Image (cartoon, rainbow, N blue to C red):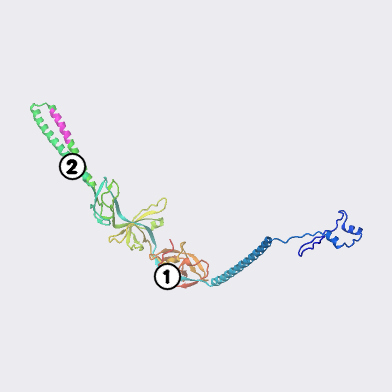
Amino acid sequence: MSVSTPLRGEHVERDRPHAHPSVPLDAERASSPAPMAPSRSTYAMEEQVVIHPPPPLAKRLALLAAVLLLAGLGVALMMRLSGAFATEAERAAARDVAAAAASEAPHVAAVLPVSAEMAPMVVISGVLEPVQAADLGFEVSGRVARVEVELGEHVEAGDILVTLDRASVGAMAAQSDSAIAVAEANVDMIRDRVELLRGLVASGASPARELTSAEQQLAVAMAQLEQARAGRRSASVSAVNHTLRAPFDGVVTRVPSGVGAVVGPGIVLVRVEDLSSLRLASTVSQSELAALRTGAIAVLEERDGVPAVSGTIAHLVRSLDATTRRAPAEALFPNTDGILVANALVRARVNVGVPIPALRIPATSRRPDGTILLVNADSRVEARMVEAMADMDGSWLVTSGLSETERVIRRAAEAREGTVVVPDLAEAGAPSTEPSAAP
């Protein structure tokens, strides 16, 4: 019998002799006689060899791929950590730079207030309307035949503006003339008959009832004549209604686009405005109403091409509206040279008292809430409420809450309250004319 020799790397398990299951191995060895050394052939017969094959190639490849994947993840993680550390270092450097810059106080432009005077005044605003204006149209329907004026033309009262086609008016006039002629001929004929019958009745040649009948016919004929004449007058009025005339001296601000259009009664075709004087209609509060007087001088603000023209307060209604608690007020401004523009939004100022001392600051120094920003003795930005009013040039006149030696920040929007700044004082000259930030 041949003997199988185990290969290198193979696991060999040798079976021991079978023993009784209830007898321990040590007891069995102790009770049994010492075994004799078996011969080589006997030992080979009793051995049972178990051989485990090597792992397949797929498992080894999967293990290799797993190792490579773990190695790649480790490399990627190390790279991300390195990038995060570099970014954090850059941010730390930027914070250090910002902290170093923040430690230096910023520079801001500041000015010293300039002494001035302010006269107590009332400001009224509204639309500069024409002193009188009219939208014109025909009372009858018809077709536009002629447009006699141009846009912007100055007209006088009674000038013809637009005319309608008069063909129908001519036909009505001719018909009325014919009716009048027929009625007059009938009256003459019946009147002659009445005169004849009166002689016959007086001589007894004709009965009186024929004269009475003739006189009645004459009365009817005369009524028909008056009716025909009324028709003629109606035709004349219709002819007048076919012509549109200017009701007053003024400027034409609207005209039809052309002829041939059919229009109806009441349709506006032409607008005429009297621009010799313009009216500013507005409202004022109760305190302003108490300060204003009829005849007081009102001056328009010079802005957006509107010149500084002087006018007068023409009307004051000393009754407050129940809802708004304001009273109507009107000011008239002469416009003989035509420099004012009608229907423009304007503001006018009315001086109502004696001038008082004030301090002038730039328009951009005042914030919308009525406060200004100052640089105090500790070089910190401080907010302060002041009483001020806008001047004609756009600057602000402060009457209380500010002294001449205090440093006012020129542009309030560029500073923040409570911060430490370095004020750069400008020359105490004319104030800035930049638009005001206040309403």
Q: Position of residue 112 (x, y in %)?
A: 45, 71
- Tell me the kind of residue under disc 2: Ala
Q: Position of residue 90 (x, y in %)?
A: 57, 70
Residue 237 visible in the picture = no
- State the CA–CA distance, disc 1 to disc 2: 84 Å
**Closest to the observer: 117 or 190?**
190
In-image side of 177 versus 275 (left or right): left
The picture quadrant where one finds residue 352 is bottom left
Residue 76 visible in the picture = yes
Q: Position of residue 136 (x, y in %)?
A: 28, 50
Residue under numbered circle 2: 174
Q: Is residue 53 magenta?
A: no
Residue 189 vertical position relative to residue 121 in the rendered view, above or below: above
Outermost residue on the left side: it is 203
Q: Residue at x 16, y 40 (%)?
A: 178
**Closest to the observer: 335 or 41?**
41
Disc 1 versus disc 2: nearer the observer = 2
The chief SS type of the magenta part is helix
| Image quarter hosting the N terminus | bottom right
**Closest to the observer: 42 or 77?**
42
**Closest to the observer: 250 or 398?**
250
Packing grade of label 2 (10 A; few <14, some 14-19, many >=20) is: some
Q: Residue at x 12, y 34 (%)?
A: 189
Marking on residue 114: 1
Chain part drawn in magenta: 210-222
Q: Is residue 221 magenta?
A: yes
In the rendered structure, which disc, 1 or 2, sits on the residue that comes first in sequence? 1
Q: Position of residue 78 (x, y in %)?
A: 63, 67
- Tell me the kind of residue under disc 1: Val
In-image side of 438 versus 213 (left or right): right
